[in-house]
Image (cartoon, rainbow, N blue to C red):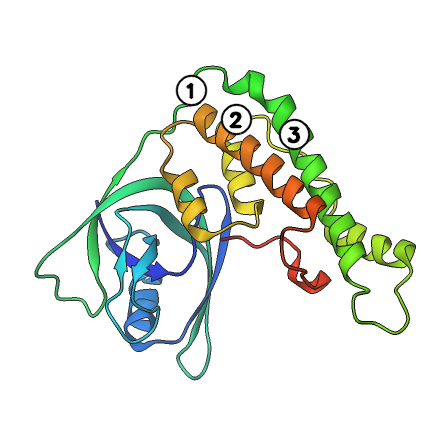
Amino acid sequence: MQLPVFPLHTVLFPHLPLPLHVFEERYRAMAKDLTADSSPYAGRFVVSMITDGSEVGSDAATHDVGTICEVRSAEQFADGRWMLIGVGVARARITPVEGATTPFRIVEAVELADPAGDGASALMPGVQAALDAYLATVKRFVVRTASVGRTEPLEPTEMAASLDRMLKPIQLPEDPVAASYAIGGLLQIELSRKQQLLEIPDAASRLRAELHLLQREARLLDDGALPPVQPSDIGYHPN
């Protein structure tokens, strides 16, 4: 299928939401086309991570594997800007379409299969335990570092209570494919690693990679090898 592409400095996983503030003229035109009753795109576009260039004012180069995103809500402001809420629906391999007459880029998007892979279900208990341990480690790390440089250290119980409100226990979906994408969205890692997770061809292999990353990130946090972060920086982000 031929769809518009939205280059972003983010990685969107299927099943996860994506809020978009659309202000550049060409993407305002794209939002208008996506939401039109007669739209040939049926409210769908492709999100692809930028490899070179910026999100604004240039034709950025992107990875050739991205995620088809479906608009679930759209609001246009009086000044022409749009606020879109989309949800990832499928991974896709994309190739440019030459000669498009639209102000935004069009790509040929071919959906990629999403098999569970061998042993995916058996991995789920261990992955859930690793996710629980990772979130618990994040809480300990923030409590430990939040008082650095303060004349009066924060009460650990007060900070922990605040973090409990932000980082609630997360029960992964029973479906290994959906669970693998949920973890990809939750992990606070480099975008290049997220892109690698997106491109893994089956859920079992993705879950194995994520199990390693969850354990690695928790270990680095416990060892103090990662830079301190503010509590406001720790939380769920859809990319």
Instruction: Sort mark 1 into few (<14), some (14-19) or many (20+) by Cα contacts within 10 Å.
Output: some
Question: Residue 185's spot in the image, x, y percent?
Answer: 53, 46
Q: Residue at x 68, y 34 (%)?
A: 171
Classify mark 1: helix, strand or loop. loop
Residue annotated with mark 3: 128
> Height in image: 79 above or below 69?
below
Left or right of 119, for residue 228: right
Give the image location of residue 101, x and y in percent.
12, 66
Q: What amino acid type is highlighted by mark number 2?
A: Pro
Q: Residue at x 26, y 72 (%)?
A: 58
Front position among marks 2 and 3 = 3
**Real-space Cα separation, disc 3 to disc 1, in angstroms:** 18 Å
- The residue indicated by pointer 2 is 176
Look at the numbered discs 2 and 1 and tell me whether their residues touch, using CB distance below 8 Å.
yes
Res 117 label: 1
The location of residue 204, given as percent across then percent down, is 47, 24
The image quadrant where one finds the N terminus is top left
In the image, residue 207 above or below residue 111: above
Compare marks 3 and 1 and give the one earlier in the sequence: 1
Which is nearer the eye, 127 or 216? 216
Q: Is residue 96 visible?
A: yes
Specify the amino acid type for callout 1: Gly
Towards the viewer: 134 or 152: 152
- Please tell me whether mark 3 sits on a helix, a strand or a loop: helix
Q: Position of residue 209 (x, y in %)?
A: 49, 32
Residue toward you, 54 or 88: 54
Q: Residue furthest left?
A: 99
